[in-house]
Image (spheres, coloured by chain):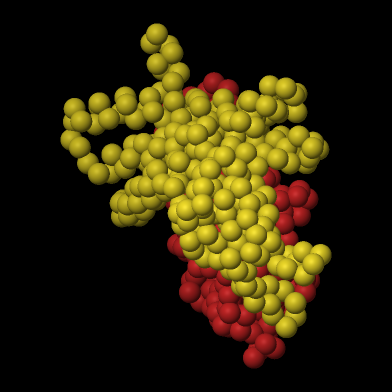
Chain colours: A red, B yellow
Amino acid sequence: MEGAHLTLFWLALVAYGVEAGFRLAGVASASMWRSPLFAGVLLHAAFLGMRWGLSGHAPMAGLFESLTVFSFCSAVGGLILCGSEETEAAWKPLSILVLLPQAGAALIGKRMTPLYPALDTPWFASHVGLSFLGYGFFTAGLALGIAYLRGEEDAVYRAAGKSALFGFSAFSGGMVCGGIWAYYAWGSYWIWTPKEIWSVIVWVYFAALTHLKFIPAHAGWPGWTKRLEMGATAAGYGVVLLTFLGVSLLLRSSHSF
Amino acid sequence: MNALWRFLTSLKTCAWAGVAFCVAGAVGSVVMGRYPELFADMDAQVFAGWFARKGFADPAPTSWLYGLLLATALFAVNAACCTAERLVQIFRGKVTMRLLLPHVMHIAFLGVVLSHLVSAVYGDRIPGVAIPQGGFAIVGGTGWAMRLDRFDAVMAPEGYPKDFSATVTLFRDTTPVARGVVRTNAPLFHEGYGIYIKKFGTTPWGAPYVVFDANRDPGATAILAASLLFTAANLLYLLPARRNDA
């Protein structure tokens, strides 16, 4: 069973690779539901479900599981927000953004490890799962932001706006779950570590971003335009990446891998 | 006065406060690692006490915290003024749930900030209460003595802990006032304090010992309530947003 579930992981990687290859070659699928990316998501879901069953905990601990869940949530976020023909321009960057973390996970040890007792709680899955779902929507936001900056289509703009709103909502839910869990596990809903600070940075960044569309456009610096908003939506992915990988790998934190 | 009100209710103020928060926080996350001797005990006491002692004594490496606090305050005042102004406009016209929900979220956000302020000023942190099994220790300034009646750890064959629990009794003078089991993700609560297992081990003479933390966050319940209100309003806001394709 352990080998079989990893086969699903590799098949999902191949599907994502085929999708990215097709997109880079300019070959488009007939519809989202017939795309290699959709097949990859199904295989990926089966992989994660099997791994959850085998390990006995949500597969979101350690760098390998974090990267592969990040890839999965990016694909799901993309399917939800970029599924229509009008947003097809976002699929090329999206396919690469889904492929990269999965390819990164492929290079890392995949051994299942037991959870530290404090992590063995439903709060773990809800906190981490919702946070990654938020990351997934923000990833779709990068793809849509790039697509808008190149084509300036209204449908893409609306979908990108949803990416910030949906991602912000999921991420907020993850923060609430994390706060409740931390209160019961470590004695405080808040501790001063780089990861916690960066989590609030992500929250504040996207909270502010969801307000930008309501600022009337005018020419004064920095130019409160749709292009600025889309640029900020795309740049949000950088903030997410710094929070997810940068802080965990480079700074000492409660969430280090 | 009008200019000040326009500044406080402006969405641009919200955007710039957000940028200031992000910059201050990013700088702080790096500075914290550069000055571990300064920031290591930040969670060992409530924030107001720590800041009063370290923030003013060593302002240079803690300047990011001033920025963070100012940006948070501006963010909160901006949300409060925006909501005050908009609610007046909304209630003068046709009131819809869709119009109200962002302001419910603003109010919930303010609830979180203010409740956290209460915890940061009036909370308490009593770290490192070490007790060998059968022994007693004084729990900070609470007036309690805590006895570790029993400690159990379930270890996996590979050597890592699978579960651990400590049975403790709290005494005031010589009278037991509370008894319970502290385990992973399940502290013992008494009179607003939560008692948590920080770490455990074995004394040189072979008895198990446990190090406890006792924390009090008077704003925690209000923060939970405000967070749940925020989440509920946020979820409701998504529903019409999907229908209207907004």
User: Closer to the camera, A91 or B154?
Assistant: B154
**In the rendered view, does A14 fall on the left or right side of B2?**
right
Query: Where's residue A198, x and y in %?
Result: 63, 44
Query: Where's residue B63, x and y in %?
Result: 69, 25
The answer to whether any part of residue A18 appears in the image is: no
User: Closer to the camera, B2 or B108?
Assistant: B108
Instruction: Locate the N terminus of chain A by quadrant.
Output: bottom right
Instruction: Locate the C terminus of chain A by quadrant.
Output: bottom right
Residue drawn at (67%, 50%) of the image: B128
Compared to residue A255, the image places residue A211 above or below, namely above
Residue drawn at (55%, 76%) of the image: A45
Residue drawn at (45%, 41%) of the image: B218
**In the rendered view, does B224 fall on the left or right side of B166?**
left
User: Closer to the camera, B104 or A214?
Assistant: B104
**In the rendered view, does A107 fall on the left or right side of B15?**
right
Query: Where's residue A177, x and y in %?
Result: 49, 56
